[in-house]
Image (cartoon, rainbow, N blue to C red):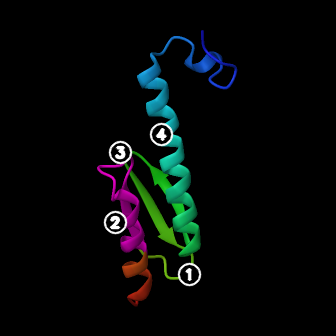
């Protein structure tokens, strides 16, 4: 019933739960690429993602899940605005 792509880890989950996990993974990869392009690295993960700039040490906190279709644009704005300000 499940494809090999989904694997055993998701064997007991519904299709909606599997899509949710895959969507989160894509969202996280997109945020990671954005953060790296602005010089940020992930410091910790809890209910939010905490990013720290490699040079200035400034922190940016982002949501762990997308709130709407503009979530990535908004997060990019956080990185951009925080990169432009001085420490």
How far apart in space, not on screen, are marks 2 and 4 (Cα)? 18 Å
Disc 1 is placed on an element classified as loop
How far apart in space, not on screen, are marks 2 and 1 (Cα)? 22 Å
Mark number, residue 23: 4
How far apart in space, not on screen, are marks 4 and 3 (Cα)? 17 Å
Front label number (2 vs 1)? 2
Q: Position of residue 45 (x, y in %)?
A: 45, 48
Front label number (4 vs 3)? 4
Position of 51 with respect to 6 (left or right) is left
2 and 1 marks in contact (CB < 8 Å): no
Which image quarter holds the N terminus? Answer: top right
Is residue 10 part of the magenta span, yes or no?
no
Residue extending furthest toward the right = 4
Residue in the picture at 65% in, 20% down: 7
Q: Which residue is mark 3?
A: 47
Front label number (1 vs 4)? 4
Q: Which residues are magenta?
A: 59-79
Mark number, residue 55: 1
Sequence-first tag of 1 and 4: 4
């Amino acid at each position: 019933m499940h494809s090999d792509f989904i694997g055993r880890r998701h064997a007991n989950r519904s299709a909606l739960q599997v899509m949710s996990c895959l969507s989160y993974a894509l969202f996280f990869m997109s945020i990671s690429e954005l953060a790296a392009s602005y010089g940020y690295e992930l410091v910790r993960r809890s209910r939010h993602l905490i990013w720290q700039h490699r040079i200035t040490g400034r922190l940016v906190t982002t949501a762990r899940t997308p709130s709407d279709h503009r979530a990535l644009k908004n997060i990019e704005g956080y990185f951009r605005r925080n990169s432009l300000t001085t420490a």
